[in-house]
Amino acid sequence: MADTVREIERKYEAEDDTRLPDLAGINRVTAVVEAGTEDLDAVYYDTADQRLAAAGITLRRRTGGRDAGWHLKLPVAPGVRDELRAPLSETPPPELTALVRSRVLDGELVAVVRLRTRRTVRVLKDAAGTPLAEVAEDAVRAWPAAGAVDAGTADSGRSGARWREIEVELVGDGGAGLLDEVGRALTAAGVRPASAASKLARALAETGQSRDGAVPDERPIHGSAKAAVRAKGKGAGKRGKKRPTAGDVVLRYAREQVRLIVELDPAVRRDLPDAVHRMRVATRRLRSAFRSYTKVLDRAVTQPIGIELKWLAAELGVERDREVLTERLREGLGELPGTLRLGPVDARLRIWSERRRAGARDRLLDVLDGPRYLALLKTLHAFLAEPPLRKAAGRPAPEVAAGAVLKDYRRLARRTEAALTASAGRERDEALHGARKAAKRTRYAAEAARPALGRPAKKFAKRTKRVQQLLGDHQDSVVARGALRELATQAQRAGEGGFTFGLLYGREEALAADRERALPDVWRKASRRKHRTALRP
């Protein structure tokens, strides 16, 4: 994996006659130390329609300076990016291109802009001589990459642009407060905050190459689909403001889930905390919306997509379920007194988990690099570009949304009542699991309906979530008991004894029984008629 550096910086526009103010005395800065001047030469890569630039992502090959090589910058928050670095090579390295696959799809990465920068760096240090931040004054020249393939063309300045800018980047523990104070000093000296988010964005604009670049999941409803939604709407609300249609609300929700899947792809590949879980939830929410809002979206189109989303969620779940299960078993072991922890139970659990993790991680990366996942991403983009709207998509959102949520609620009610009367054991476990899935679908339908139904939908989703969580904890206990049986068997075969794992098994049985006893009261509170009545427009 490529090296990663967290980049926290502020950018400012400067003029040829701009002079830096004295920054000593700001915050903890006691010295401003000259760090020299360096010449940087960078070529930026993107697709022909600039999908990376539209997402605030930059991929460049840079020579000169202290960090020559390939750099991929992924946005984290305003002013914060993760920069992943790889050694110099002639073509973009696979370890970086894999991280933009969800954006690029099967498009070709080509050189779009070349930048040459003369950079003068000053380091802000505290009283102990510790670096806090770097202030870089950059004199930048930019050309379309096709017109600057060699130094001679680049020096000619043809179709190029020139500007100066100042970057202030944290390199120590100065924190956002230091950046704020330096920014105030710069603006007091007449320096303006940069209007462009990056050098690439400014270069594309000033060399006349900026394009729409938005992939379909970032575009508004357009073309015939948009016209159909508006044409079927029933007029304006107060003060002439157009009321949202059912199509507006459902597509907004679907677009958000696709955006999350695309954005979380590189985080999952990098194994960042909670990334797998969040991506899995987005796939489930999108599939659930397809199933709940069949009056808005043509089921003949969304059902095949839903099948692929279910497949992806299952692949993501292999790793996620291992994480959750391992943490649950570790917590159980941690609550036992030492006198009951017989044998190398911690080591046994660690080996069991790591073996599963290695296989799950490799399998997931193979999935993300495979043709089936790529086909799904392309299908999702096509779906948003031309949504398969049905007639009800043009109706007012509240009545359609309420109908969808209440339909899913009735399904949940049937399954919950069946679970409450099921025989103890496997039959009840399976019935409770089915009710859990129905609760999740009802909750997601209510969440999607919030823009149409407002506070009642928010409260309804919250109450349904309580039911889902209780049933989810019960299902986690069922899965944990299966794992504990496996661990106890492995321990016994190794001559270690399975007493402790058996003890945890009994604990999980007791927890499951407790959740079963709590369900009637939780369900009674969530299923009150007044909660459903509040949803009706």
Image: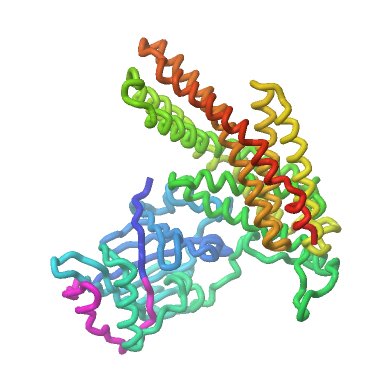
| Left or right: 110 as drawn, with respect to 136 | right
Say if 527 sits above or below 423 in the image: below
| Residue 371 x %, y % | 60, 41
**Residue at image coords 22%, 83%:** 22
The part of the image, by quadrant, that contains residue 132 is bottom left
| Residue 237 x %, y % | 79, 74
**Is residue 32 visible from the viewing direction of this image?**
yes
| Magenta-span inclusion, residue 199 | no
**Residue at image coords 53%, 29%:** 511
| Left or right: 453 as drawn, with respect to 162 | right
| Magenta-span inclusion, residue 18 | yes
| Left or right: 127 as drawn, with respect to 352 | left
The part of the image, by quadrant, that contains residue 327 is top left
| Residue 146 x %, y % | 48, 68
Say if 471 sits above or below 176 in the image: above
Kindly give the residue lying farthest to the left in the view shown. 128
Q: In which quarter of the image is the N terminus?
A: top left
Say if 408 sits above or below 435 in the image: below
| Residue 323 x %, y % | 47, 36
Q: What stretch is highlighted in magenta?
A: 10-36
